[in-house]
Amino acid sequence: MNFSFTQEQDMLRKTVRTFVDQEIMPNIRQWDISGHFDLGVLRKLAGLGLMGVCIPEAYGGSGMDYNALAIVCEELERGDTAFRTAVSVHTGLNCMTLLQWASEEQKQRYLLPQARGEKVGAFGLTEPGAGSDVAAIQTTAAKDGKEYVLNGQKTWISLCDAADHFLVFAYTDKSKKHQGISAFIVERTYPGFSSKAQKGKLGIRAGNTGELFFEDVRIPADNLVGQEGDGFKIAMSALDNGRFTVAAGACGQIMACLEASVDYCRERKTFGVEIGRHQLVQQMIAHMEAGLQMSRLLVYRAGELKNEGKRNTRETSLAKWQACDFANKAADDAVQIHGAYGYSDEYPVERYLRNSKAPVIYEGTREIHTIMQAEYVLGYRTDKPLNRMLPAWKP
């Protein structure tokens, strides 16, 4: 086992941290208050080669390993969850899924410009009546000659108004249940497509989240990803990648909570001493540090399995579950450490607490991951081989 980062990975972390300090930190409070998603941040990330950091150079990416993506997500979430979410969706859920499942023609047409950051990709699975229960989706795609006609609705879709391309899941044969779901690449410009942002969210207010609508949207048959009926497998493998980035981002959330809390512990005094001298405050700081270090080990372990081209559903599930729970607790403790000031947007910790709740829910609730881990241990769940694996990283 090697627990050291490479020189290239260390340089990447410094680059992203500097970017966050200069481009996100000075603006995020106002963006959060106004509910503004700044697409310019993604353009600047693209200029640094970070929108396709782990995609091979042959397909427009930077060719770094999968743990490089974890580093990017960790540092971005230190700034705000909204921008980690954007990279999670664009790179983790869309680009990496195309790298794994798309045809060569689809990779050239869609993956290459997305990895370069020239186009933005998103992911459309969740519906008003279908979250954890994927088989409950109602969106359909009916074959009509050389096209599919798509009808339905998606909700809670990140980058709904910002993305150019969407990886959308729909039934091509409802009688087959899970095996009747297929995946399609849908372009925003297709007639019958529309999107609408959702307001009033508890957290991640600086992100763009909303609904997608499909009214007799005609999709070229060439935009079918994989084969008819592959959709459920494609969606689950995509979630492996998305959950990996969410777990990495949770590490950044804990890191942000620690930094803010340590600063406040040295700034605030009670009973004649810095509050960091009080043992129960130290206990909260210690729990944050423990959560950060344990989460990182789980995340980078999953990333190394990805680097080796090995199935990592079990390991990624554990990382996502634990890191997100640790981040939620760290944010709660950070508010407690700040006392009454933690309840005000004068300090960033109230935003951290609001932002920390969504990752506990999306891409598999904590309850879903709890059941998954128990079933692995009990032998009720095993991961079957996929006919297309995420490519191993080649230095």
Image (spheres, rainbow, N blue to C red):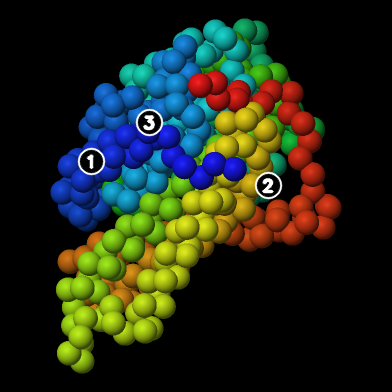
SS assignment at label 2: helix
Crowd rating for badge 3 (residues with CA inside 10 Å; few <14, some 14–19, many 20+):
few
Residue 198: image location, x then y, percent: 37, 47
Sequence-wise, the earlier of marks 3 and 1 is 3
Residue sitting at x 20%, y 86%: 273
Mark 3 residue element? helix
Name the residue located 41 percent from the left edge and 27 percent from the top edge: 53
Distance in Å between CA atoms under marks 3 and 2: 28 Å
Earlier along the polypeptide chain: callout 3 or callout 2? 3
Q: Please give the residue where the numbered disc 1 appears in the rendered image.
A: 18
Residue that numbered label 2 is attached to: 314
Task: Tell me: residue 133, above or below residue 138.
Answer: below
In front: label 3 or label 1 = 3
Q: Secondary structure at mark 1?
A: helix
Per the image, the residue denoted by label 3 is 8
Identified by mark 1, the residue type is Thr
From the viewer's perspective, is 104 left or right of 39? right
**The N terminus lies in which quarter of the figure?**
top right
Q: Please, what is the three-letter code of the amino acid marked with disc 3? A: Glu
Residue drawn at the location 47% of the way across and 11% of the way down: 58
Between the C-alphas of marks 2 and 1, the distance is 33 Å
Question: Residue 382, position in %: x, y?
Answer: 79, 44
The total number of labels drawn is: 3
Q: Residue furthest right?
A: 379
Q: Are marks 3 and 1 in contact (CB under 8 Å)?
A: no
Residue 266, visible in the rendered structure: yes
Q: In the rendering, at what x and y percent does residue 74 appear? A: 39, 46
Q: Residues within 10 Å of mark 1 (few under 14, many from 20)?
A: few
Q: Nearer the viewer, mark 2 or mark 1?
A: 1
Residue extending furthest toward the bottom: 271
Residue 23 position in % (x across, y down): 19, 40
Residue 219's place in the image compared with 325, above or below, is above
